[in-house]
Amino acid sequence: MTNGQRRGELEKIRKAHGGKLNPPHIVQAASNPKHPLHADFEWDDTQAAHEYRLDQARRMIRVVVIFADTEEEEPTRAYVSLMGDRTDGGGYRALVDVMSDAGMRGQLLAEALKEMRGFQRKYRRLTELADVFKAMRKAKRETVGASAMEGE
C-alpha cells in the first residue's frame, strides 16, 4: 500500500468520526480482514503483546533522565538511540558515553540537524516561530562550517 493510499484510508476514518483521527478508530476499522489497513497490524495476540512490551521498554528508556549539577539546567535523557545502532539491531547508549566520543557525538549532532529540518517542515507555517527558525539556520551554518574546517 502506498503512502497516498494509506492516507486516503485514514481520511475516510477521520471523516467518519467527526474530523478527528483517533487510533482506536483506526484499529477498529482495520480489524476487518478485508480492510486495506488490516495488513499493517499484528493480529496475533501473542506477538502483539510481545511487541507492546518492547514498546513499553523503549518508553521506559526514553523517560529516564539525568539531572545536571545546577538547578537552572533542565533534566536530560540518560540514554539516546543513534541511527547507526538502529540499522544494526537497535539499542540505546548512555548519553555521557556518546558525548565523550567524537564519532558518536557527530552522529547525534547529525540526527539533531535532521530533526531540526523535520521540525521546520512541520511548523513552517507558524510565523510565530520565525526567530526559532532563524536560530536553527544559524546553528546549522555554524555546525556545517565547523565540520568542513575539521575535514581540512
Image: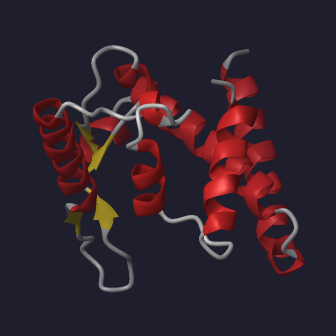
Above or below for 120 versus 149: below
Above or below for 42 versus 52: above
Instruction: Provide residue 24's location: percent of width, then percent of height.
Output: 40, 61
Instruction: Provide residue 40's location: percent of width, then percent of height.
Output: 45, 31
The front one of 5 and 110 is 5
Instruction: Provide residue 145's location: percent of width, then percent of height.
Output: 78, 35
The front one of 51 and 12 is 12
The front one of 68 and 85 is 85
Residue 105 appears in view: no
- For residue 87, which quarter of the picture? top left
Q: Is the N terminus in the top left, top right, bottom left or bottom right quadrant?
A: top right
The answer to whether residue 116 is left or right of residue 101 is right
Q: Which residue occupies 74% across, 57% down?
A: 122
How many marks on residues? 0
Q: Which residue occupies 55% across, 37% down?
A: 111
The residue lying furthest to the bottom in this view is: 71
Give the colour scheme shown: secondary structure
The answer to whether residue 144 is left or right of residue 46 is right
Residue 123 appears in view: yes
Above or below for 68 versus 84: below
Q: Which residue occupies 70% across, 54% down?
A: 11
Instruction: Provide residue 54's location: percent of width, then percent of height.
Output: 18, 40
The front one of 9 and 131 is 9
